[in-house]
Image (cartoon, rainbow, N blue to C red):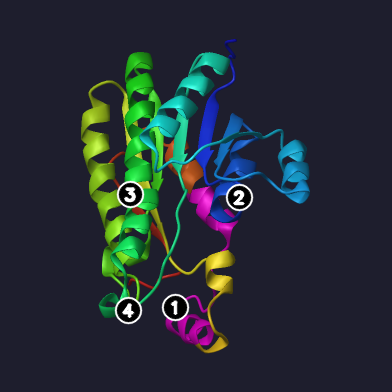
Amino acid sequence: MSTEKKVALVTGGAKGIGLATAKRLSQDFKVVINIHSDPTPEQLKIFDDYNLTYVKGDVASEADSKQIISDIVDEYGHLDVLVNNAGITRDKLMTRMKQADFEDVINTNLTGTFNMSKFALKQMQRQRSGNIINLSSIVGLNGNIGQANYAASKAGIIGLTKTIAREGALRGVRCNAVAPGMIETSMTDALSDKTMDYYKETIPLKRFGTADEVAQTVEFLIQNPYITGQVIAVDGGLTI
């Protein structure tokens, strides 16, 4: 089946920044979200409210990633936007970090972004149009204590983004990255009150950002046709 409405795929779209992005894009796109496990009844209601379709699969798996893209193209005839948002953390000081914890984060965050981008880019190049937005982090720009694995994965995403932008531009495909700072999500909910107070005092705007404020930036990068290969920090001035 082919559809005239543009199609957007958001990975890790069941909650947080991914869900906020899916909601915002649903105004103008047919949105498909990729999730790793079965959604809860509450999530299903949200998906229904925003007319979101979901597909299960592990972005760290090359086979799953290829199938996800193939299924979407078979269903709708095209893929216009890919938002690589799926990510995990396994925080620990580097001297105490197990290799498995390092590899798990790299596999999901960085290899997952590569896998999905690879197969999406092939389709978009055939279309001679498309847009890939990768979720990096200010941790990928600056590093962070206890996040060697996460920082490495998010820094890698920046290099990957710039390469995709150069290769994609040859056939009308753009690629940019968003680097959120301290955003109100389940990841920051796990922080201690002391850590949260520290960051709120350090951030020039004196507050954490919202998932929708990140989603607004994703939407802006999709809409502006002359931006590619860029990394935009959404951090309240934390990296000034």
Q: Residues within 10 Å of mark 4 (few under 14, many from 20)?
A: few
> Residue 76 lies in magenta, yes or no?
no
Badges 2 and 4: C-beta atoms under 8 Å apart?
no
Sequence order check: which comes first, mark 3 or mark 4?
A: 4
Q: Which mark is residue 93?
A: 4
Kindly tell me whether residue 124 is visible in this rendering.
Answer: yes
Which residue is painted at 51% across and 13% down in the image?
77
What amino acid is labelled 3 in the image?
Leu
Give residue 110's mark: 3
Residue annotated with mark 1: 204
- Please state which of residues 12 and 133 is positioned toward the viewer in this rendering: 12
Badge nearest the viewer, 3 or 1: 3
Q: Nearer the viewer, mark 2 or mark 3?
A: 3
Residue furthest to the bottom in view is 194
Q: Is label 3 in contact with label 4 (beta carbons under 8 Å)?
A: no
The reply to whether discs 2 and 3 touch (Cβ–Cβ < 8 Å) is no
Q: Position of 213 compared to 126: left or right?
A: right
Given this view, does label 2 or label 1 mark the residue nearer the observer?
2
N-terminal of the two: label 3 or label 1?
3
On screen, 60 above or below 153? above
Give the foreground label among 3 and 4. Answer: 4
Image disc number at residue 20: 2
The residue drawn where x is 39% and y is 38% is: 61
